Image (tube, grey):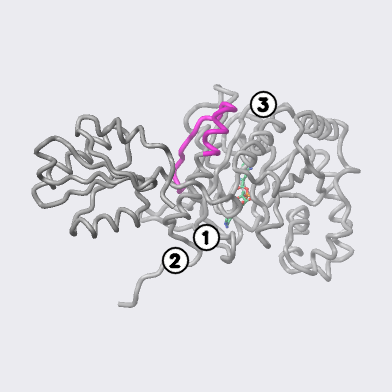
Amino acid sequence: MSSLQPVRGTRDLIGEDQRRYRHVTETARHVSGLYGFEEWQTPIFEDTGVFSRTLGETSDVVTKEMYTFTDRGGDSVTLRPEGTAAVCRALVSNGLTQSLPLKVFYAGPMFRYERPQKGRYRQFHQIGIELIGPAEPLADAEVIACGWQILTALGIADSVTLEINTLGDAESRAAYRAALVEYFTRFAADLSADSKQRLEKNPLRILDSKDEGDRKIVADAPTIAAHLTPLAAGFYDSVRNSLTALGIPFVENPRIVRGLDYYNHTAFEFVTTQLGAQGTVMGGGRYDGLVKQMGGPETPAVGWAAGIERLAMLIAEPKTDAAPIAVIPAGDDAEAAAFGIVQRLRAGGIRADIGYKGNLRRRMERANKAGARAAIILGSEEAARGVAQLKDLVSGTQSEVSLDALLEAVRALPSGSPA
Ligand code: HAM
């Protein structure tokens, strides 16, 4: 049998990769907690309709990227390509639509059949927050502020730019849509096949096209600004004013439409130039119609999600765990006592380990290689006397310590890791 490889677009997280992943997730969990977001977990697959009816029938995600299959009972299910529709489904199925506002944090795997490249995978992972209930523009600013604080806590706020836009309300969008249809119809012959279809079904999607030819035409397309109702323009003003008041820097980018169809009013992305083509690290916006589409009552909401892999590539290497204490029995009859010591250290909250094999020298070598902070060496004669040698592997000093006092002596070691 040929050797098994991970499926294209999937990765194993081992060593530093997993430490980076964990640091991003734990930082986001902690900071979003400061804003009152509570973690939810929803299943990683849903009825296909949860996504196909809500993300947009002309969106790339629905038309090309979903992992959809018929299960053994004949039901069509889909591995979740994103978390927002799933959270809204959970809100409705759990009868929580009367318990608003709700602040939800989530973290976990998402699946999209995309062409894999740096920063783009078929199984990737998102952290995300959803603030469900408030219709006020202040909620949009709060959600963005939480994202900004997470990026700051990760030490990468300087590497990203916040770009914002408005997609207006339904009336603004209808007027804008008409303007886009008029504009793009003039270039219909030159549009890509995908965009020709979008022209009929959802001309806004053309603005998001990756096709080179389309992009040239899009460059001169009208923006929504001239078509905003006073209400939508006022909403956008408030969001911008709140961000300014909070000291969060942003630029306006009228081309942001987002890849999913459920957005209205605010749309935003945190982008970086450091990751090549996959520069969007966090994206989101307001989606006032989604809960209703999911069968719930009219419910305003706003949120974002960020690609953990992309954030993990930008952060500095996270610190490793505290250096371990190596317990080394010298001679076979000290083995059992050494196991007793290592267990007592662990029960006392100390990271400790014992090698399984080898003579004293081999085990010392291994302790050094593992970056141990100190070694506890226990000979059988010493065990009988109730003492052990504690060797500080940073300073090189060694002293005899009574077994009863070992835990305290280890705790008293000056912090520092061996060179
Ligand atoms: P999205 O823009 O589709 O939005 O994805 C959010 C982020 O997930 C992207 O900015 C990117 O960092 C990451 N991402 C997306 N696809 C991939 C991939 N194939 N490989 C690696 N990373 C990827 C949403 O998913 C919305 N649910 C966001 C939202 C929440 N809107 C409101 N609330």
Give, as a three-letter code, the residue at label 3: Pro
The verdict on residue 31 being magenta is yes
Q: Residue at x 74, y 39 (%)?
A: 266
Q: Is residue 55 above or below residue 10?
A: above
Q: Position of residue 223 (x, y in %)?
A: 86, 49
Number of labels in the image equals 3
Image quadrant in which the N terminus is located: bottom left
Q: Which residue is mark 2?
A: 7
User: Along the line of sight, which residue is nearer the eye, 47 or 23?
Assistant: 23
Q: Is residue 117 above or below residue 45?
A: below
Q: Tag on residue 134?
A: 3
User: Along the line of sight, which residue is nearer the eye, 13 or 169?
Assistant: 13
Q: Which residue is mark 1?
A: 122
Task: From the image, state whether disc 3 or disc 2 is nearer to you.
Answer: 2
First-in-chain label (3 vs 1): 1
First-in-chain label (1 vs 2): 2
